[in-house]
Image (cartoon, rainbow, N blue to C red):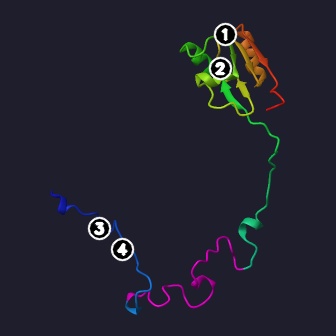
Amino acid sequence: MKLHELSDNPGATKKRTRVGRGPGSGKGKTGGRGIKGQKSRSGVAIKGFEGGQMPLYQRLPKRGFNSRNKKSFAVINLGLIQKFIDTDKLDAKKEITEDVLLETGAIRRKLDGVRVLAKGEITAKVKLSVTGASKSAVEAVEKAGGKLTVTTPAASE
């Protein structure tokens, strides 16, 4: 096989229809746009317009509510904290704060704070200081002999 013998599979490519190139082409004169009217003109894009009828996106019911003051937390599980301690990325002897978790790459960004959840097991005796934690996470840390303190974020943030 040589380079000049290469070709695409039959039907894989299709020639572009050249519009408005005479009556013999089948798409000549008006170019398949019909006669007159808004859509026959250039520069018209009527997205979502249904001829004066109420458009579908306006007919559908709007549901739910999004709070403006809602806080979103970066979530970390106890299992991940334990994994980072096992791989010596986190030091269990020192206090683990949100900034330490951010520096080690345990969380990507702080958002409005860090919330610890109880998925996975923790065996190390750790001292955690975070913005939020689930009750089961607090219990699991205390059961392992550590302490989890929940701080409130600063008012300036």
Within-10-Å neighbours for mark 1: few <14, some 14–19, many 20+: few
Task: Judge depth for marks 1 and 4 and give the one in front.
Answer: 1
Marks 3 and 1 sit apart, C-alpha to C-alpha, by 68 Å
**If you read the primary sequence from the N terminus, does the residue marked by circle 3 or circle 2 appear first?**
3
Q: Is residue 40 magenta?
A: yes
Q: Amino acid at mark 3?
A: Pro
**If you read the primary sequence from the N terminus, does the residue marked by circle 2 or circle 4 appear first?**
4
Within-10-Å neighbours for mark 4: few <14, some 14–19, many 20+: few
Residue at mark 3: 10
Q: Amino acid at mark 1?
A: Lys
Task: Judge depth for marks 2 and 4 and give the one in front.
Answer: 2
Task: Judge depth for marks 3 and 2 and give the one in front.
Answer: 2
Q: Are discs 1 and 2 less than 8 Å apart at CB? A: yes
Residue 103, quarter of the rendered image:
top right
| Numbered range of the magenta stretch | 25-51
Name the residue: 73% across, 20% down: 137
Q: Amino acid at mark 2?
A: Val
Task: Judge depth for marks 3 and 4 and give the one in front.
Answer: 4
Residue at mark 4: 15
- Please determine whether, in this image, residue 25 is positioned above or below residue 119: below
Residue 100: assigned label: 2
Residue 94: assigned label: 1
Marks 2 and 4 sit apart, C-alpha to C-alpha, by 59 Å
